[in-house]
Structure formats: structure tokens, C-alpha cells
Image (cartoon, rainbow, N blue to C red):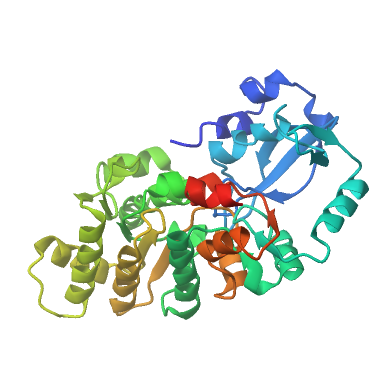
Amino acid sequence: MNFPGTLVEVCPTGVFTDKPFLKHYSRKWDLQSAPSICSGCAVGCNIAPGERYGKLKRIHNRYNNEVNGYFLCDRGRFGSGYVNSDARLDYAGIRKPDDSFFAVHQRQAIDTAANWIKGKKVAGIGSPRASLEANYLLRELVGADNFCAGFSDVEGSIIASIAKILQTTKASNPSIKQMEGADAILILGEDITSTAPRVALALRQAVRNKAFELAEQMGLHAWQDAAVRNLAQDQRSPLIIVSAMDTRLDDVASQRISLAPDDIADFGVAVAQALLGKDTDNTEAIQVAKILKDAKNPLIISGSSMLHQGVINSSVAVAEALPKQTMLSLALPEANSLGLALLVDGGGAKPKRVWRKSAGDISALIILENDLGRRASEGHWRVC
């Protein structure tokens, strides 16, 4: 599981502590805290970071009923060590031609940068990790035609399609609270534990809905956990995972189907065909279609991690082929992937176009919180 850090937060006596907090210990009542949003993934869990003497000391969960509830994954809780890293630049600076670097006042850095780009043709590369405001201001500075969202070509196309789907599909985009009420779940080509840990926890809760249903029939209250678990034994609500790899949800899955990405897309199409009453020779797809059709609150999950448009399209086809209102959740890779896709909405330059401009008619390039080594070949980003 990805949530053992929760034990530290709920411990009423302080017996359980965590090593990152102990390393730079402060009394909890001396911390200055503020409401914030976790940037560890695209779920948007609510957090409360605590600071003292200019150092981030800890991150605690901040309750939000529709998103993370009382839980925060360990990536969000312990993944902020880079903030206090000695290698991190926490001041404005200017790098000289000889590669030396010196700190300057922020005002001086702004004036120097303004002088460098004044009267020049400038391009900008945004980032799905940066805030929407920062990306917007960079686009305004360089112009929409010279602004690149910072996705790779394939990644940008996939995420743009997800943004379009969420705006147009007849399926509902559920909150995590609503996902916990699903009584049949189909995951197509997404390791949700890695891309959205808090959603994975909701799915673990959802598979227990069969137990709660049995308990209600027997007159047991849901809070009688031991009795409910004893009654249900191994009975769970169906969770079907169709993936190219092992996942950490396999232990609670009712069915696990291992396929290559192209075959996952074909499987989703076969399920949609079976739901629409069309002929298909895929017996597993027919079985999955029956499970989804019999469910009261079916949930379909996919995402961008495979960078395969067919997998995403097939998940939408399944959700829209069901005769009832269906929940559809599409996982995204980074904290502001969807926000940046909505900001650009087809109006930004493609990365390759920016590379060509950088080598030609663009004389200055502004990069916003992006690692070009992840999204471009060495030959491309060295041109910049």
C-alpha cells in the first residue's frame, strides 16, 4: 500500500513519527501551516504544508470529502524533500558565458532578463507541473504562436484528446467519493496505483461494496467491520484489470487480463460491441460486458500512461455503450496536465516547431519548470 504514513498522522500520542520530520524536528505547534494542493500527481489531494525558519518541515492531509477524505498517499506526504535540497536554487541568479553563476536581487534578475529579450523574437516552453497562472503569463509574453505547452508531441495529443473527451462524453467524471460507490470496475491499460494512488485506495474500498450489500441484507451495520468481513469472506464487487503489467491492485481484482497495448484497445472495443448487442468472438469481453451491464454503478478507468489513443478511445466507447449513466475516469500524468491542455486548446506551437524556430528565427527561449531531456531528443534540446 501507499498509505502507511497515515499512521503517523492519526496516532493520538505521537508514538509514531516519521524520519523526514525527525531529521529537522520542530514542535508541531511552532509550525506555520497553510492550505494547499498536492503536486505529486493529477488527483489534487488537499494538503497542509508546515514551515518553520524557511524550511518545509512536514505535509499533512487536509480533509476534503469529495477528493482525498482523511487520506494522503506517501508520495504526497514524503515526496517534497526536494524543496529543502541544497542543490535547489532558491534565489534569482545569472549565469555567465564561462558557466559561473552568481546570485542577484530579484529585481535585477527581472531587469536583466527583460533587457535580454527586448526587441527579440522569443519562444516559450511551458510545463504541466507549473501553475496555470505561470503558463498563461508566459504565453502572453511570447504570443500563442511561439508558446509550446511543454508536452512531447505524442503526450500533447493524448492529453488534448482527454480534455476534449471529458467535455463532450455523456459519461460522468466522478469524484473519488463517487468512485467508492462503484459496484463494478473496469480498468483498461492503466496502473492506477502509480498514476493516482488515492484513486487506487478508493477502488480498494469499492470492491467491499459487495460485503456491505450482504451486511445490509443480514441487518448488520457497516461500522461493524469484523462482522461484515466475516460475513463476506472472499466475496468482492467485480474489479477487472486489463493491463500490460502487474499492478498493486491485482490482489483485489476479480479478473486479471494481461495484454499488449494494441490488444487492450481491441479488447475495449470488443466489450463495447458486446454491450451494444453486436457479434464478437471474444468470450472474456462478453463476460465483462455482462458484469458491467448488471451493475448499478459501473466505473470505467483508463489514462495516458501508455500513450495509446486507442486504449483511451476504447474506454470511452465502453462507458458510452452502457445503457445507464456510467462513471468514466481518465488518469493524467502530472499535477497540471489537464489545466495546461485546456489553456492551450490547440492554440500552442508544437515542440518540433519550437526547436526549429530556436535554431532559426528565434533568438531567445524561455523554459518554465520543464526538463527538456524527458520530452525531447538530445539533438533537439541542444539546439536551444
Looking at this view, is 115 or 319 the one in front? 115
Residue 251 falls left or right of residue 367? left
Q: Is residue 301 above or below residue 18?
A: below
Residue 21 lies in quadrant = top right
Residue 278 lies in quadrant = bottom left
Residue 164 falls left or right of residue 101? left
Farthest left residue in view: 281
Residue 34 falls left or right of residue 169? right
Residue in view at x 46 percent, y 80 percent:
168
Residue 184 horizontal/vertical position (percent): 31, 61
Residue in view at x 37 percent, y 60 percent:
302
Residue 314 horizontal/vertical position (percent): 29, 69
Q: Is residue 108 visible?
A: yes
Looking at this view, is 87 or 11 the one in front? 87
Residue 49 horizontal/vertical position (percent): 73, 40
Count of numbered circles on the image = 0
Residue 365 lies in quadrant = bottom right
Residue 330 falls left or right of residue 44? left
Residue in view at x 25 percent, y 43 percent:
234
Residue 333 horizontal/vertical position (percent): 49, 53
Q: Is residue 222 visible?
A: no
Q: Is residue 110 above or below residue 118?
A: above
Looking at this view, is 330 or 294 the one in front? 330
Q: Is residue 163 above or below residue 95?
A: below
Image quadrant where one finds the N terminus:
top left
Looking at this view, is 120 or 277 the one in front? 120
Residue in view at x 79 percent, y 35 percent:
51
